[in-house]
Image: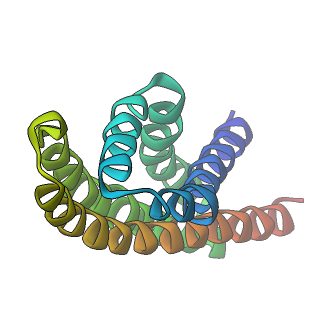
Amino acid sequence: MADLIFLLTATLTALTGGFFYAFSCAVNPGLARLSDGGYLAAMQSINKEIQNLLFLSSFMGTLLLLPLSTWLEFRVGITDSFWLLLATTFVYTIAVFGLTMFGNVPLNEALDRFNLSSASAKDMAIQREKFEIPWNRFHRIRTVASVLTVMLVIAALVYRSRTSG
């Protein structure tokens, strides 16, 4: 059973990291080319659509399975794999989940309250600047942290396989 938990943990961690990486590589550069109104409308739409079962399963599943995997490895002993999983849990919880919930989500909620249909071009430019710069900064940090969590989980699995077999 522990092997299945570790496999699911690694898979969900990789899916989340890959999602943020792809967003950084393709979506953000594409959005940056849009007009202020187009950018704001696109982000409002994305922020609504992202609240779906597929994304939330990987994003929240990682948050639940990393501590479980860490605990399962702790039961085996204080191993290199345990320390790597513990580090992964902290990095994901603070720099991916925490930053999303306390950085990106409040910006998304503020953007959702912005009424595009009654906004002037100047209002849209101001709103975009207030949103885009901090949102992208938070996103870059969580993307790097997500990639780091994938690397740490893989390293933990490598160490685990060396010591268990």
Q: Position of residue 44 (x, y in %)?
A: 31, 39
The image quarter in which residue 25 lies: bottom right
Q: How many marks?
A: 0
Residue 52 lies, with reference to residue 143, above or below; the image says: above
The single residue placed furthest to the front in the displayed view is: 121
Q: Position of residue 31 (x, y in %)?
A: 48, 57
Residue nearer the viewer, 42 or 146: 42
The single residue placed furthest to the top in the displayed view is: 53
Q: Quadrant of the C terminus?
A: bottom right
Q: Quadrant of the N terminus?
A: top right
The image quarter in which residue 82 lies: bottom right
Q: Position of residue 19 (x, y in %)?
A: 59, 51
Here the colouring is rainbow
Q: For the point 40% across and 66% down, which residue is it?
A: 139
Q: Is residue 158 left or right of residue 10?
A: right
Residue nearer the viewer, 57 or 80: 57
Residue nearer the viewer, 125 or 65: 125
Q: Position of residue 150 (x, y in %)?
A: 64, 63
Residue nearer the viewer, 132 or 155: 132
Q: Is residue 113 left or right of residue 29?
A: left
Q: For the point 48% across and 45% down, which residue is it?
A: 68
The answer, for residue 37, to whether it is visible in the render is yes
Residue 155 lies, with reference to residue 104, above or below; the image says: below
